[in-house]
Amino acid sequence: MRATTVVFVSYLVMIAVVLVAILAIGLAGR
Amino acid sequence: MRRALQDNSLSIVFGLLLLATLAGQSFVGLAGYNEQARTDGLAEISWGRYVTSSSFGVDVAENWQSEYLQFTLYILLTVWLVQRGSSESKKPEDAGFRSAEEERIGEFADADSPSTASAGGWVTKLYSASLTLVMATIFLLSWAAQGVAGRVAYNEERLRDLLDPLPLGAYLVSPDFWDRTLQNWQSELLAVGSMAIFAVFLRQRGSPESKPVGAPHSETPG
């Protein structure tokens, strides 16, 4: 299950990083 | 290691395909952006500048939001709505919430059930909706990102046409925002609806998304 947990967390982190980045870029007017 | 890769091959392969297509999107998106810049007599930009631009951001976010809306709706609506004969549906008589015993929660939890399922109270209530809650949160965040980045990208076009930039409130009721939104929603809803009904009559041997090839059309695996 450890590898499965790593894949699960990787997806969540990747999604969060991309969305926060797009929000930050948009709010900065870039 | 090999076992771990095999056990997670579905998620890993889709994750890698995502990264490859996102990279591809960034290169063809940059080519299109720079082609437009040349036409307008403006300076071209680098790949690094493009992938950190609102133009790229809005293109990513508008597709993400619709995918997560699709799954949020599908997860939630299939609690109550059914399609008789579809591998994507519960049996018509099972529509609605299952009992605590069927869900194996609280006192009915197994020894190896997640602790959040056996805890009971608000913890189990929250965990019982966690898939929908996470999908819906990603949908709302993606949609917000589409709005915020879409405004900047749209205002860039307006400035080229010597028009005033729109504030966020005005952009969120603009045709550009809703065109990006609805064109993605319609395709997702078509894909989900057709999958639900196609799975009644069509088969893919070996796929958990399909009924067994010889299953009667009227059989709902549930």
Image (tube, coloured by chain):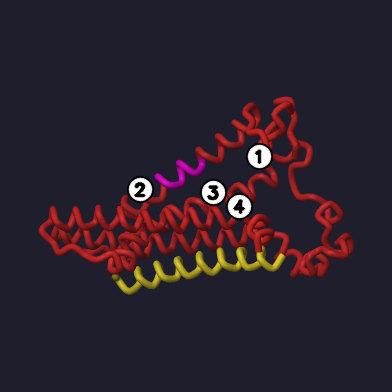
CB within 8 Å, label 1 to label 2: no
Location of residue A9 with respect to B38 vertically, above or below: below
On whether residue A18 falls in the magenta region, the answer is no
Q: Residues within 10 Å of mark 1 (few under 14, many from 20)?
A: few
Q: Amino acid at mark 3?
A: Gln
Q: Which residue is at 81% across, 55% downward? A: B103
Q: Earlier in the sequence, mark 1 or mark 4?
A: 4
Which label sits on residue B10? Answer: 4
Quick one: which chain is yellow? A
Label 1: state its secondary structure: loop
Residues flagged by tags 2 and 3 on a common chain:
yes
Q: Which residue is at 88% across, 65% downward? A: B111
Q: Which residue is at 40% across, 45% downward? A: B183
Residue A14 point in image, percent of width and height: 51, 66
CB within 8 Å, label 1 to label 4: no
Q: Earlier in the sequence, mark 4 or mark 3?
A: 4
Q: Earlier in the sequence, mark 3 or mark 1?
A: 3
Work out how far the residue at label 3 is from the one at label 1, CA to CA, in angstroms: 21 Å
In the rendered image, the quadrant that contains the N terminus of chain B is: bottom right
Chain letter for the residue marked with disc 4 in the picture = B
Work out how far the residue at label 2 is from the one at label 3, CA to CA, in angstroms: 17 Å
Chain letter for the residue marked with disc 2 in the picture = B
Chain letter for the residue marked with disc 3 in the picture = B
Q: Earlier in the sequence, mark 1 or mark 2?
A: 2
Q: Is residue B185 left or right of residue B134?
A: left
CB within 8 Å, label 3 to label 1: no
Which label sits on residue B70? Answer: 3
Which residues lie in the magenta part? B183-189
Question: How many numbered tags mark residues here?
Answer: 4
Residue in front for this viewpoint, B96 or B62:
B62
Residue at the disc numbered 2: B179
